């Protein structure tokens, strides 16, 4: 899985990069068909925004956006939301083929 991290109005430090990559590997590592994951971190007034865009095989594209006062909390929630969406997509495909 190819991971790219972009920061808008936020300096992306090595700690943030390590946290994002670890969380992505732990949560989305069980889906072998994921090709790319793009994480966009943004700061708007008092909120930090984390947007995760996952591109997988078979033209599957999943996007999730989460806001929080804490950047790490926003990242965690966005990745967990993406994981739920990927599970739902996988279950749809598996149920269809049974």
Image (spheres, rainbow, N blue to C red):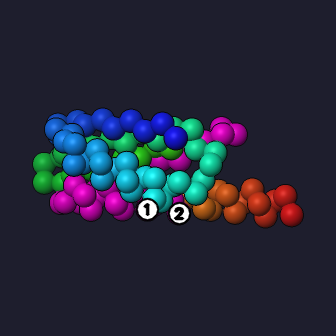
Residue at position x 43%, y 62% in the image: 80
Left or right, 54 with respect to 45, comes to right
Give above or below for 47 relative to 8.
Answer: below
Report which quarter residue 88 is drawn in.
bottom right
Estimate how packed mark 1 is, as few (under 14), some (14 to 19) or many (20 or more) residues with alpha carbons within 10 Å: some
Q: Which residue is mark 1?
A: 80
Residue at position x 16%, y 38% in the image: 11
Residue stretch rendered in magenta on the structure: 55-84
Q: Position of residue 96 (x, y in %)?
A: 81, 59
Left or right, 90 with respect to 74, comes to right
Q: Secondary structure at mark 2?
A: helix
Residue at position x 36%, y 62% in the image: 77
Q: Secondary structure at mark 1?
A: helix
**Is residue 46 rendered magenta in the image?**
no
Between 44 and 79, the one lying in front of the other is 79
Q: Position of residue 50 (x, y in %)?
A: 31, 49
Question: Which numbered circle lies on residue 36?
Answer: none
Q: Tell which residue pokes out farthest to the left in this image.
A: 45
Q: Which residue is mark 2?
A: 84
Q: Position of residue 72 (x, y in %)?
A: 25, 58
- Which quarter shows the C terminus? bottom right
Left or right, 11 with respect to 22, comes to left
Q: Are marks 1 and 2 in contact (CB under 8 Å)?
A: yes
Q: Position of residue 27 (x, y in %)?
A: 47, 59
Counting every numbered tag in the picture gives 2
How far apart are the alpha carbons under marks 1 and 2? 6 Å
Residue at position x 57%, y 38% in the image: 35
Q: Tell me, yes or no, if residue 1 can be seen here.
A: yes
């Amino acid at each position: 899985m190819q991971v790219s991290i972009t920061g808008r109005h936020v300096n992306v430090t090595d700690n943030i990069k390590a946290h994002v990559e670890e969380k992505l590997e732990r949560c989305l590592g069980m889906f072998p068909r994921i090709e790319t994951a793009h994480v966009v971190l943004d700061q708007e007034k008092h909120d930090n925004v984390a947007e995760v865009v996952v591109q997988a095989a078979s033209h599957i594209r999943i996007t999730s956006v989460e806001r929080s006062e804490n950047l790490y909390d926003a990242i965690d929630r966005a990745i967990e939301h993406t994981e739920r969406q990927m599970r739902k997509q996988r279950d749809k495909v598996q149920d269809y083929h049974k």
